[in-house]
Image (cartoon, helix red, strand yellow):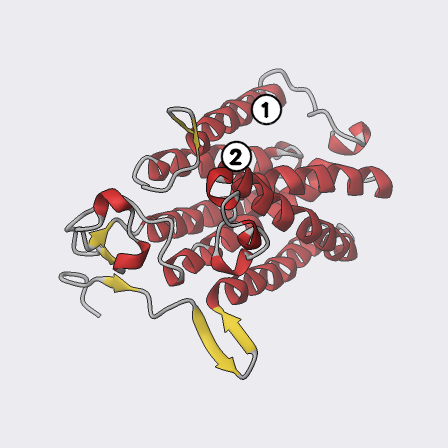
Amino acid sequence: MFLLGFQFQSPGPVVFEIGPLVIRWYGLLISSAVLIGVTLSQWLAKKRQVNPDLVADLTIWLVIAAIPCARLYYVIFEWQEYSQNPGDILAIWKGGIAIHGAILGGTLAAIIFARLNQVSVWQLADLIVPSLALGQAIGRWGNFFNSEAFGAPTNLPWKLYIPVSRRPFNYIDQEYFHPTFLYESIWNILVFVLLLSIFFWGLKHYNRLKVGTLSLVYLIAYSCGRFWIEGLRTDSLMLGPLRIAQVISLVLIALGIWGLIWLYRVKRSLPDVMPNSAK
């Protein structure tokens, strides 16, 4: 494969069909991301001398909460379309989930889980966010196979071909678009490497890496990339004239910076369901 002159083109959303059984790339990638993420987070938990079974149990809560919330979030902001096709609301295999909805649902589930199990929610989050970044890198390829979540028209060497049926009406005569799924996938891999580097640095300097640091770095690092990439997309969820993902990204960046200042300059623990565990 040569970079110059290369174009991305989806082979289609279906991996294979056997009678009524249809295996789609979107579902396969999400399932793979969850399995890989659980394995990684359990391994990180062992490194931090945290019971890995907690991570496995938490994952069930996260999946149950995050995926429906990610879909609900997307449907709410695209209600004009789904109100005309209510049968597609549950058709998650066709694409249409929002990571910010997943983060919101997952956060609520994690807080409840941590309270019930009397553990620090920030400690659990620190074990989850590297897997979350890696999972996002994997899951973004589902957008590629579905020919969705692409950017504006481009003639760059790594351009993405979009079939006519998937093009926005105002770009119907354009063939090639920014592969924003690829940009975000690469960005998330870099975030994943950054978080793992900090994690292992923390193992050697445990008293200097405070609980919640990895989670806050994730919020800042991921959101910086998402803010930039979102500006290239043609299908952003909108709130009036604003791209909602960019607004949320700015809020998360601000919260992440505030949290790091609180930890390392003010030298206080983050609010937690188990304050003593977060010190």
Residue 223 lies, in percent from the top left, at: 45, 35
Q: Nearer the viewer, mark 1 or mark 2?
A: 2
Quadrant that contains the N terminus: bottom left
Q: How many marks?
A: 2
Q: Secondary structure at mark 2?
A: helix
For label 2, count other residues whose C-alpha is less than 10 Å away and answer few (under 14), some (14-19) or many (20+).
many
Q: Measuring 39% from the left and 38% from the top, which residue is drawn there?
A: 236
Work out whether 80 lies above or below 164: above
The CA span between labels 1 and 2 is 10 Å
Residue 3 lies, in percent from the top left, at: 19, 62
Q: Measuring 70% from the left and 43% from the top, which residue is drawn there?
A: 124
What amino acid is at disc 2? Leu
Work out whether 201 lies above or below 243: below
Of residues 245 and 90, the one nearer the viewer is 90
For label 1, count other residues whose C-alpha is less than 10 Å away and answer few (under 14), some (14-19) or many (20+).
many
Work out whether 252 lies above or below 194: above
Residue 41 lies, in percent from the top left, at: 64, 54
Determine the residue located farthest toward the front in the rendered image: 84
Evaluate if marks 1 and 2 touch, with contact meaning CB atoms under 8 Å apart: yes
Of residues 159 and 42, the one nearer the viewer is 159
* For marks 1 and 2 on the same chain, the one whose residue lies earlier in the sequence: 2
Quadrant that contains the C terminus: top right
Of residues 58 and 72, the one nearer the viewer is 72
Work out whether 204 lies above or below 246: below
Query: Does residue 237 appear anywhere in the picture?
Result: yes
Q: Secondary structure at mark 1?
A: helix
What amino acid is at disc 1? Gly
Residue assigned mark 2: 219
Residue assigned mark 1: 259
Query: Does residue 98 appear anywhere in the picture?
Result: no
Of residues 183 and 200, the one nearer the viewer is 183
Q: Measuring 79% from the left and 28% from the top, which residue is drawn there?
A: 275
